[in-house]
Amino acid sequence: MNSTTSGTAPKAAKTRIALHWRILIALVLGTLVGIAINQFWTASTWASLGVNDAGAFLAGRTPTPDPNANPNATAIPNPNANANAVAYIARFAGKATKFIGDLFLQSLRFVAVPIVLFSLIAGVASLGDPRKLGRIGGRTLLLFLITAVVSCVIGLALSIAVKPGTFVSVEVRMQVLSAFGNDAAKRIASAEAAAASLSVWDQVVRVVSSNPFDALARGDLLQVVVAAVFIGLGLTMIPKQTAQPVLNVLHGLAEAFLQLIRLIMKAAPYAVFALIVPIVANLGLTVLGALAVYGLVVVAALAMILFVLYPLVLRATLPKGQHISFRRLFRAMAPAQFLAFSSSSSAATLPVTIECVRDRLGVPEDITSFVCPLGATINMDGTAAYQCIAVTFLAQVFGVALGPIEYATIAGLAVLVSIGSPGLPGASIVLMVVVMDAVKVPTQGIAIILALDRVLDMCRTVVNVSGDAIAAAAVAGMEGRDIPDLMLTPNQPKLDMP
C-alpha cells in the first residue's frame, strides 16, 4: 500500500497571505487603534493615571516653569509625580511604536541611495549608446512634464468647480489658525530659503553636485541621479572589456541591496501599523469634519490622475498587443503603494518601487533603473495637483480673487515646486509658500491645511509612486520593449516570498 492510501500523504504547503494583503490588514488595524486612542484616551484619562502634563510626561522632561511664578523658587513642581505604572506602560508603548516605524523608514533610506547609484550607473551603461540614453531621457522628462501639467489642470478644475473654501466658516478658520499657527510659522520661515533658490537657473545648477560624495552623504537623490547618469555615460565611452568588470560589480551590489529590501519588507506589516497609529491618534475629528470637502476634492483629483490619466498614458504609449490592466498594475505595485501610503515618503519607498516595477510589473531593468530613481525626485503629479487645490482653497477661504493669469501662475509654479520638492513627508507644504506669495494668498493660511496635510500627503505619495511605475512602463512601450507579466511567471523573486 502506498503512502497516499495509508494516510501518510505529505501535507499541502501552507498558504501564505500575500505581503500587500498583510500590509492592508496592518493599515486597517492601525487606523482602528488610532481612532480608539483619539476618542477614548483623553486628558482625563491621563489625569486618572496621575499625569497632569501629558506632553511633558511623554517627552520624559520636567515641565516648563510658569513665567509668572516666584523667580526665587528653586524647585519646579512636577505635576506628573504621581503617575502610576499604567501611565509608564502607555509611554513605553508609544515610544516603542515610534521606534519600530522610524527604524523601518531609516532602513529603507539606508538602501535607497546605494541602490539608486549602483542600479542607475549599470542601467545607463547597459544602454551602450549615448544617443539611446538621450532618447530615453528626453521621453522620460517629456512624459513627466505632460502628466504634471495635466494633473495641475485636474486639480484646478475640481477646486474651481466645487469651491471647497466656501464650506469653511469664519469660526472654524480662526479655530484652526489658533491651533496650528505656531507650526505654520515655522514652515513659512523654512520656505524663505527655498524661495531664494527656486529659479529655473538655480534649480539646474543645483542638480550638479560639486562633490558627489557629499551628495551621497546627504542623501540628495537628484544629485545622486545626475552623478550616476554621468558615470554611466562615461562607462559607455570606454572599451567594453574595461567597463565590463565595473558593471559586474555594480550589478552584484544592486542585487545585494535588492535582497536587503526583501529582508526589510518582511517587517513591513508591523512597521506600517506602527506608522499609522500615531497619525490617526493625533487627528481631531471635529477639525477634520470641517475640512472634509477640501479633503474630498484633493482625493477626487488624485483618483482621477490614478484611474483616468495614467491609463490613458499607457494606452497612448504601449504598442499594439501590449496591455496593462488595472488588476495587473495594482497587483504588481501594491507593496510599494501601501508602503507609500503609510510612510508618506516616495524617497523611502523607492527601493520597493524599483523592485515592484522590475520584478513584478515586468518593465526591463535598464528602463526601471533609469526612470524610477529620476521619477522619485522630479515626478510628483500628486504633489502638483495638491499644490493647485490647496492654494485655490485658501484663496477662497480668505476671499482672494483669482483670474486666468493667477491660475496659470499657480499651475506653472506648482509644477516647478513639485519638481524641487524632496520626497519626504510634508516637504511640499513648505514650498507652497512660494506659490501663495505669487498670487497674494495669506501665507498664515497654511495653518488651516496643516490639520489635514498628513493624511493627504499619504494619498498623494501613492499617486507619485504609481506615476513612476506608469512612466517606466510608458517609456518601455515607446522604446518598443516587451513587458511580460512576471506575476504569472513561476520562480520569480517576489516581495511576499516566505
Image (tube, rainbow, N blue to C red):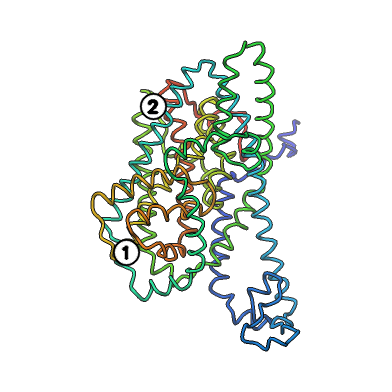
Residue 116 occupies quadrant: top right
Amino acid carrying label 1: it is Gly
Residue 73 at what x, y percent from top left? 73, 87
Q: Residues within 10 Å of mark 2 (few under 14, many from 20)?
A: many
Quadrant containing the C terminus is top right
Mark 2 and mark 1 residues within 8 Å of each other at the beta carbon: no
Q: Which mark is residue 318?
A: 2
Q: Which mark is residue 165?
A: 1
Give 356 or 50, whichever is nearer the viewer. 50
Residue located 36% across and 56% down the image? 391
Q: Which mark is residue 67?
A: none
In the picture provided, is 99 more to the left or to the right than 208?
Answer: right
Give 468 or 176, whichever is nearer the viewer. 176
Amino acid carrying label 2: it is Leu
Foreground label between 2 and 1 = 1
Residue located 58% across and 55% down the image? 26
Label 1: which secondary element: helix
Quadrant containing the N terminus is top right
Give 452 or 212, whichever is nearer the viewer. 212
Residue located 70% across and 40% down the image? 11
